[in-house]
Amino acid sequence: MTTSTDPLAGPAAAREPYPLRWIALFVLLAAEVMDLLDALITNIAAPSIRADIGGGASTIQWLGAAYTLAMAVGLITGGRLGDIVGRRRMFIIGALGFTAGSLLCAVSQSPETLIAFRGLQGLFGAVMLPQGLGLIKEMFSEKEMASAFGMFGPVMGLSSVGGPVLAGWLIDADYFGTGWRMIFLINLPLGLLAVVGGLRFLPESRAARPPRLDLVGVVLAAAASLLVVYPLVQGRELDWPTWTFVSMAVAVAVFGLFGWYEARKHRTGGDPLVVPSLFRKRGFTGGLIVGLVFFASISGFSLVFSLFTQLGLGYSPLKAGLVGVPLSLGMVGGFGVAQAVKRFGRTVIHGGIAVMASGVACIVLTLHLAGTGVTPWQLLPALVLTGLGMGTLMAPFFDIVLAGVETHETGSASGALTAVQQLGSALGVAVLGTLFFGILGDHVAQATDTVAPTTLAAAGVSGPAQDRLVAALRTCGHDRASAKDQEKVPGSCVRLTGELRAAPAPVRQAVAGAGAEAAERGFSDSMKITLWVEVGLLGLTFLTAFLLPMRARPEE
């Protein structure tokens, strides 16, 4: 069956539905599951990956940012390739490339190669995923289309709940000695299933009037995005050299050049990546700003919270994954709440932001009251509240942003919004991850000044000897928390170890205990500050949301 999409053609109901459409839908859902899992699992696996193959804090950030940045750059082009050469063909190419990228991630031996292959995964994911929308519109009648799209909600919910738990379980189980590598190997059967299913069950489909590729636009958008994200991720480890600020300034100029080029291409009768008329609509430009800030806050929060539970609280990967389940369940509940109150339009988004900000503030309060001994059960209410607000906000977001968009602009607008969602995710990982690691060393040092004197006094150390050990422990804790290479023991810690060799056992135990407690307090204090920044981002989201249309477009 070969079909074509033509905006001048009759309604979907006038076509015969594709006979194998429901089986084909499950093939598309398998691809969606692969993407959702890979967008989530490295947050849980990052500490294990770094412990195995090395790298600094930027390695952890790039594991997520490389994937989402590549996805952001490739999404619009991926959809257009399907329009031009066939959606079925591009889906299979994307699934094959994604599966190969997963295998290459699994066998990576260095942080650099793993990050590169994560980017490869994102690029092929951007080829694979956009084909689903066009294929569903071709395969299903108008009456069945809502049911088909409705299947994505439960799949996304289950994946958001099960993804981190699955990652933690696979890492802890260490099947065949693979450790973290199994989180990528698990994609192989899913990917091969998607490829075989695509060959067997998907119809061929392409646009009757395919657009031309805007390769210059793709290059400009990619360059501008990379010029922002790269210095944000690497700047802290390189002590913020001048070129990092120059790079971000140049990125603004390149984004401006991108806008000028797209407008020029549209005037000359070409096919720009983004229709320029969209930027004259307050609701759409406001939606881009809201989406950028909101999805940055979500991805940054997910990364930092996962790192805090494992590195700060000492949870295993599986336990860290289970701690996040209430957040995911709250998000699923938020989708349901949003459906029940969707008649209130933009107010639902504002309500979701307020609830999510309250949840994040409650996490801070829980950490303050429970201290470094906080348990998953104590975090549960605040996480459910955070997820509830997150889901309530996300559910109506795209419909409301697209309300002010003309019908002929919908495809371009949807692609731009999805790309901004991914770009926001990459920026969130870069900004909040950099903030968290940037303040961690100082807070560990401050906690040492509070904890160490009392602990050492209890072990019988006082006077100049105590002052000397506290100073040495403070420097060691700061340097270890701020280390660019976690495999290398800082020189200050080597000196402290040498000084303690001749010390009595109780003193050595006191120093070790004080160091561990100071590290826990430092992580907790850094987490609380990062969460307050998260609340600030949500406040900015609340204000910019007033730019959105009041209500979604009525269903036709």
Image (cartoon, rainbow, N blue to C red):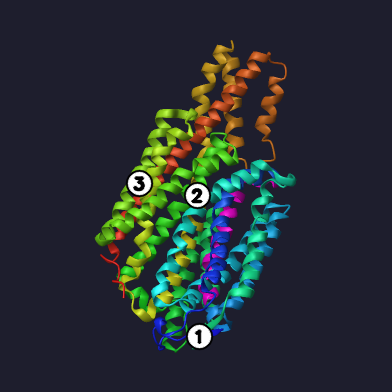
Q: Residue at label 3?
A: 357
Whether residue 54 is in magenta: the answer is: yes
Q: Amino acid at mark 3?
A: Ala
Which picture quadrant has residue 193?
A: bottom right
Whether residue 402 is in magenta: the answer is: no
Would residue 518 be found to the left or right of residue 280 on screen?
right
Residue 30 position, x and y percent, is 57, 63
Q: Residue at label 2?
A: 161
Q: Is label 3 in a helix, a strand or a loop?
A: helix
Q: Residue at label 1?
A: 4
Q: Residue at x 29, y 55 (%)?
A: 350
- 13 or 399, nearer to the observer: 13
Q: Is label 2 in a helix, a strand or a loop?
A: helix
- 264 or 290, nearer to the observer: 290
Sequence-earlier tag: 2 or 3: 2
Q: Give the dominant element type of the magenta stretch: helix, strand or loop.
A: helix
Sequence-earlier tag: 3 or 1: 1
Q: Which span of residues is magenta-colored?
A: 53-79
Q: Is label 1 in a helix, a strand or a loop?
A: strand
Residue 434 position, x and y percent, is 52, 48
State the CA–CA distance, disc 2 to disc 3.
21 Å
Q: Amino acid at mark 1?
A: Ser
